Image: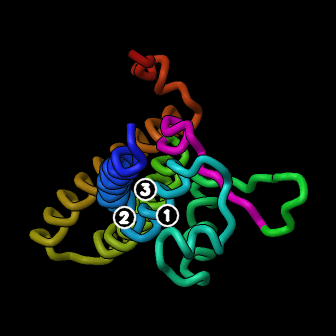
Amino acid sequence: MTNQEKSKDWATREAAVEKFIQVIAKNMNLYGITTSVGRLYGALYFAEQPMTLDDMRDALEMSKTSMSTGVRSLAEMRMVEPAYKKGVRKDLYKSEEDWYKSFTSLFGNRWRHHTESNIEEADQTIVELEMLKNQTTDEMLIEKLEDDLYRLKYAQNYYKWLMRFIEVVESGKIFEYIPKQEEE
């Protein structure tokens, strides 16, 4: 194989990997992660070695500040972790390669936050509507409030169920029900 053929093969590989990194970035949008942070994760995932912020900046042509913010976000979601290499003084980072672990962490964090917020809002709305129901004499309004309270209590039950589901995901028990896909 000539050097030109090898070079062409490497370029083909790079294009294929870049295409998949774009898919990763696009799909991470579903979890509230920006495309640029998704690209950062993809670059780290395919990197042969841990990368410094400078390495990431060069690879993605983004500012070092953007890289730092992106790495911090990914680290909070447990999708990136610090790495160490003897003799290297700069901070190194590598991707969490267990996508199941990343998903359970990311899903749990995102959904827990929103669900807890929804529970709190439902609780406050119930208190407000019950107070109104107790002080009004308008029979039609009382009837409507009872219907509203029924709907809010239904929502509360759903959010309680959702919290249990989130716990199953976060704890890893989800894999007892839906096992991880083994390598083929």
Screen quadrant of the C terminus: top left
Range of the magenta residues? 91-103
Q: Position of residue 109 (x, y in %)?
A: 53, 54
The x and y percentages for residue 150 are: 24, 52
Relative vertical location of residue 55 with respect to residue 10 in this rendering, above or below:
below
Q: Is residue 158 magenta?
A: no
- Tell me: 34 left or right of 113: left
Q: Residue at x 13, y 69 (%)?
A: 139
Do callouts 1 and 3 mark residues in contact (Cβ within 8 Å)?
Answer: no
Alpha carbons under labels 2 and 1: distance apart: 43 Å
In front: label 2 or label 3? 3
Q: Secondary structure at mark 2?
A: helix
Amino acid type, label 2: Ile
The residue where tag 2 is placed is 126
Q: Nearer the viewer, residue 14 or 181?
A: 14
Q: Amino acid at mark 1?
A: Leu
Other-residue count near label 3 (Cα within 10 Å), few / some / many at <14 / 14–19 / ≥20: some
Q: Which residue in the structure is indicated by mark 3?
A: 115
Q: Is residue 66 visible?
A: yes
Residue that carries the numbered disc 1 in the rendered image: 40
Which kind of residue does numbered mark 3 sit on?
Answer: Thr
Q: What's the image's color scheme?
A: rainbow
User: Which residue is at 28% across, 70% downward?
Assistant: 133
* Residue 123 visible to the viewer: no
On whether residue 94 falls in the magenta region, the answer is yes
